[in-house]
Image (cartoon, helix red, strand yellow):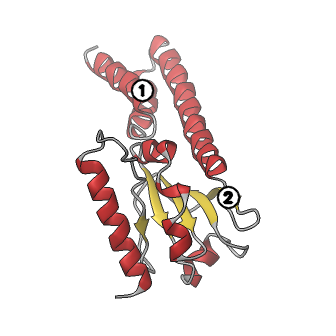
Amino acid sequence: MSHWARLAALVALIAAGAYVSPEERGLAPLVPWKVLQPDETIAAPLVLFWIPSSPDAMRRSAMLTSDSLTQSSARCVAMRVVRYDDVTRLASLHVDEDLPVAVLTDREGKLLGTVKSRRGRLSVAEVEELVRNELEGRELQAETLLDEARELATRGDVDAAQELYGKVYEARCLCPRQAKVAQKALRKLERR
């Protein structure tokens, strides 16, 4: 079994154990990282790629136990580990610096941000901030769409309002609170 396959199995076993009984004392929730295979596609609105410098460095990293990243994964931020020998993926992520590195992209692969290592260490706090800022930005965009949809509905342009509410609802995993508002508004407009 390759080094990466053993590491992936170890991460999966640890994650499974953490989710079986997360309330037990001493167990930290684990970020649901998945090791990417070359040419594997990801269907998620946001993807956080982590490129550790080695399997051993990965095992010792605080990136495995970040509460903030664990919570973000519940909001459809896919957590993926890129092997340092996956040259094609590294090139697509524009990673040519010293490892470790973390890269955030959207569904289409557009780079949204990168956190580079300093002296061989990746700042988990900076990675958490990168993801948090993107999620907050998405929430602000959803709020803006909700305001525009309300205004359109008030003016009687129901079709345009429904379209905007629909866009907010489609982002329900990234913006759950705003999606609930949009869903209620859509139901109300349908009853008109």
Rendered image quadrant of residue 137? top right
Q: Nearer the viewer, residue 175 or 115?
A: 115
Q: Does residue 189 appear anywhere in the picture? A: yes
**Can you see residue 106?**
no
Q: Which mark is residue 41?
A: none
Which residue: 63% across, 46% down? 125
**Quadrant location of residue 95?**
bottom right
Residue 132 is left or right of residue 69, and the answer is right
> SS of the residue at dot 1?
helix
SS for callout 2: strand
**Residue that badge 1 annotates:** 177
Looking at the image, residue 113 sits to the left or right of residue 141; the answer is right
Which is nearer the eye, 73 or 5?
5
Q: Label 1 amino acid?
A: Arg
Amino acid residing under circle 2? Thr
Q: Is disc 1 surrounded by few (<14), some (14 to 19) or many (20+) residues within 10 Å?
A: some
Residue 156 versus residue 3 in the image, above or below? above
How crowded pointer 2 is (Cα within 10 Å; few <14, some 14-19, many 20+) is rated as many
Question: Is 101 or 184 nearer to us in this picture?
Answer: 101
